[in-house]
């Protein structure tokens, strides 16, 4: 009798995962925990050498199990975020931690351990820990910015974990590390690393990113396929959140070149693929396009992707229906279900406008245009930006979006980034952003009474957008939020705009609210100055503080004058 025909004590689940099986009937403890059928059908390891083993059937079972785990984790995450949304966070202060054992929340519990501290080459964290992070990634990130196809990513995890570390594909291993880094980055703020590690979330983001970067030469110089581009785009998404965008700027340049190499930017390059893969190719290109244009404007350097060279359909704006037609990627729905917005598509359109803003303001070609041509170009970009802003459903505007998406607090950061980029475009076009030297000089001279500052057109509308964005930032900011540096410049610009408006109109209808918002922004900027130690930022803080004191004096003088005229009560009504 062959050894293969002898019964095994371990069931398929325990056997394939190499975990101890207690042999209980009708189902062992592990099968009960994972809610799968307890059976004994997998081939014995002694039947063939490991390098020749046929794992097709086991892989199918593994993928089914992975899907089951992810669905379970998504349910837990939904319960957790629903509970989290009920907690009120104080503006301009880090959110307080919420206990994880409350009624209605069933968190996955792990023993506090740092299992992923081994030096094994091509190692990965234990599967249970990785699956927790995968659930966070799919729910909090990939549903909004679809870097991976969910099913393809599940297969990737299953295949990689079914392979010995030394036999793992470098690009696939890097992809998993990128997913884990993004998951840590977008984890709900009141939770630590899923298995209770005492280390900070930042530690694990850097760890996973460094793991992926350790094989970046293989990713960039080996055979280029879609997964290589996905790995690079994922790396950039982590790197772009830093204060210094230089690493992200360098990497996006290489990524665009490699995307061109496999014709990711035109439909001919994916014409031979099935519809699912074709859509994913398009999605990955548009994500790279967003990063290219956005980082370009933030850094003041030219982007690589020319719009005239793109031959792809835009992301679908048709919601998924009962027949599974359409595309649900990137669609965010309000808590009451009455409004929806395709965030992914909106980011693509805004990226196109960001490219136009750079071309108008900073490109060499723009400098060679006549004044008439520059005026027409600015009018065209400003019109496109206004139409884009008008296309945002009212429920997703900056001053109300957090309350309308309270069922999913993870979305607040994405909208803060969206509205920050929008405000950056309009302040750049009007040369009224916080780092425009001519604008700041005019504000300083006006405050000192030596020169009159010329306000941009549609001033009240501009100030209104600045106010709305400042409210959004104050509601979503925390000391470790992933989007802090991506949105801080626009927040500073909003402070300068409101300060300028207070100086010109010290008794306007929103003066009390704006004074409060400016004071909060000054406190935030003071902390930022201590952190980054930039002379330019220190000068900006000093200027704004000087103007604020000028506003205070003007308001005090107006109060004294009105009181002396017996109109104190009327002043209070309009203050």
Image (cartoon, rainbow, N blue to C red):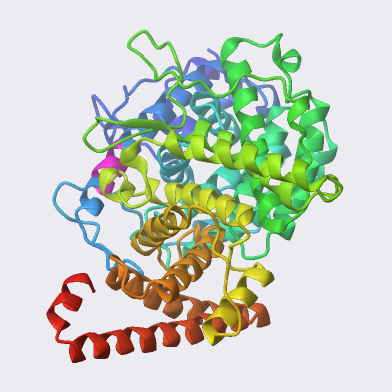
In which quarter of the view is residue 557 placed?
bottom left
The answer to which of 481 and 355 lies nearer the viewer is 355
Does 170 appear above or below 425?
Answer: above
Residue sitting at 12 percent across and 79 percent down? 569
Asked if residue 79 lies in the magenta stretch, the reply is yes
Does 414 appear above or below 46?
Answer: below
The answer to which of 419 and 322 lies nearer the viewer is 419
Residue sitting at 29 percent across and 69 percent down? 513
- Is residue 353 something one can see in this rendering? yes
Q: Give the range drawn in magenta.
A: 75-81
Does 25 appear above or below 466?
Answer: above
Residue sitting at 66 percent across and 28 percent down? 50
Asked if residue 33 lies in the magenta stretch, the reply is no
Number of marks present in the image shown: 0
Residue 58: horizontal and vertical position, in percent?
51, 21
Q: Seen in the image, is 147 located left or right of residue 263?
A: left
Q: Seen in the image, is 213 located left or right of residue 521?
A: right
Residue 573: horizontal and vertical position, in percent?
16, 72
- Is residue 167 something one can see in this rendering? no
Instruction: Report the residue that reaches farthest toward the front.
Output: 565
Residue sitting at 24 percent across and 31 percent down? 337
Residue 165: horizontal and vertical position, in percent?
66, 42
Q: Seen in the image, is 82 located left or right of residue 391?
A: left
The answer to which of 19 and 137 lies nearer the viewer is 137
Does 197 appear above or below 251?
Answer: below
> Which quarter of the rendered picture does the C terminus lie within?
bottom left
What secondary structure is the magenta-colored segment mainly? helix
Residue 16: horizontal and vertical position, in percent?
49, 30
């Amino acid at each position: 009798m062959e050894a293969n025909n002898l019964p095994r004590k371990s069931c398929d689940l325990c056997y394939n995962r190499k975990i101890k099986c207690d042999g209980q009937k009708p189902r062992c403890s592990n099968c009960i925990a994972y809610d799968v059928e307890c059976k004994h059908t997998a081939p014995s390891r002694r039947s063939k050498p490991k390098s020749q083993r046929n794992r097709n059937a086991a892989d199918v079972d593994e993928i089914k199990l992975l899907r089951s785990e992810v669905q379970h984790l998504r349910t837990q995450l939904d319960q957790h975020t629903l509970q989290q949304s009920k907690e009120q966070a104080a503006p301009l202060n880090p959110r307080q931690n919420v206990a994880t054992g409350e009624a209605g929340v069933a968190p996955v519990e792990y023993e506090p351990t740092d299992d992923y501290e081994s030096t094994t080459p091509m190692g990965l964290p234990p599967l249970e820990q990785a699956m927790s992070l995968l659930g966070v990634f799919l729910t909090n990130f990939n549903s909004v910015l679809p870097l991976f196809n969910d099913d393809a990513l599940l297969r990737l995890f299953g295949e990689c974990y079914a392979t010995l570390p030394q036999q793992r594909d470098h690009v696939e291993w890097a992809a998993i590390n990128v997913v884990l880094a993004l998951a840590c980055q977008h984890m709900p703020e009141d939770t630590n690393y899923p298995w209770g590690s005492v280390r900070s979330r930042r530690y694990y983001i850097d760890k996973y990113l460094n793991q992926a970067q350790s094989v970046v030469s293989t990713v960039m110089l080996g055979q280029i396929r879609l997964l290589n581009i996905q790995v690079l785009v994922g790396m950039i998404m982590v790197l772009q959140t830093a204060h210094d965008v230089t690493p992200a700027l360098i990497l996006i340049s290489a990524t665009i070149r490699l995307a061109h190499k496999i014709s990711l930017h035109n439909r001919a390059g994916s014409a031979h693929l099935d519809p699912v893969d074709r859509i994913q190719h398009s999605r990955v290109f548009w994500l790279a396009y967003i990063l290219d244009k956005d980082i370009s404007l933030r850094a003041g350097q030219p982007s690589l992707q020319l719009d005239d060279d793109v031959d792809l359909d835009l992301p679908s704006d048709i919601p998924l229906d009962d027949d599974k037609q359409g595309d649900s990627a990137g669609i965010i729905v309000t808590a009451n279900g009455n409004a929806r917005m395709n965030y992914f598509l909106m980011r693509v359109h805004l990226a196109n406008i960001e490219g136009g803003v750079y071309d108008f303001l900073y490109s060499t070609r723009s400098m060679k245009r006549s004044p008439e041509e520059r005026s027409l170009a600015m009018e065209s970009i400003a019109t496109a930006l206004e139409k884009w802003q008008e296309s945002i459903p009212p429920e997703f505007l900056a001053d109300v979006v957090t309350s309308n998406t309270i069922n999913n607090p993870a979305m607040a950061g994405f909208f803060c980034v969206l509205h920050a980029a929008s405000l950056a475009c309009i302040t750049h076009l009007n040369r009224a952003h916080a780092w425009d030297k001519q604008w700041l000089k005019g504000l300083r001279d006006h405050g000192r009474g030596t020169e009159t500052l010329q306000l941009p057109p549609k001033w009240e509308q501009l100030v209104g957008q600045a106010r709305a964005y400042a409210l959004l930032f104050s509601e979503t900011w925390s000391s470790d939020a992933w989007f802090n540096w991506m949105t801080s410049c626009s927040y500073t610009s909003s402070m300068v705009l409101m300060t300028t408006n207070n100086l010109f109109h010290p008794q306007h209808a929103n003066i009390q609210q704006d004074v409060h918002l400016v004071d909060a922004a000054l406190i935030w900027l003071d902390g930022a100055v201590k952190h980054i130690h930039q002379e330019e930022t220190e000068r900006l803080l000093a200027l704004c503080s000087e103007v604020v004191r000028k506003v205070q004096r003007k308001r005090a003088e107006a109060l004294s004058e009105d009181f002396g005229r017996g109109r104190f009560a009327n002043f209070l009504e309009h203050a």
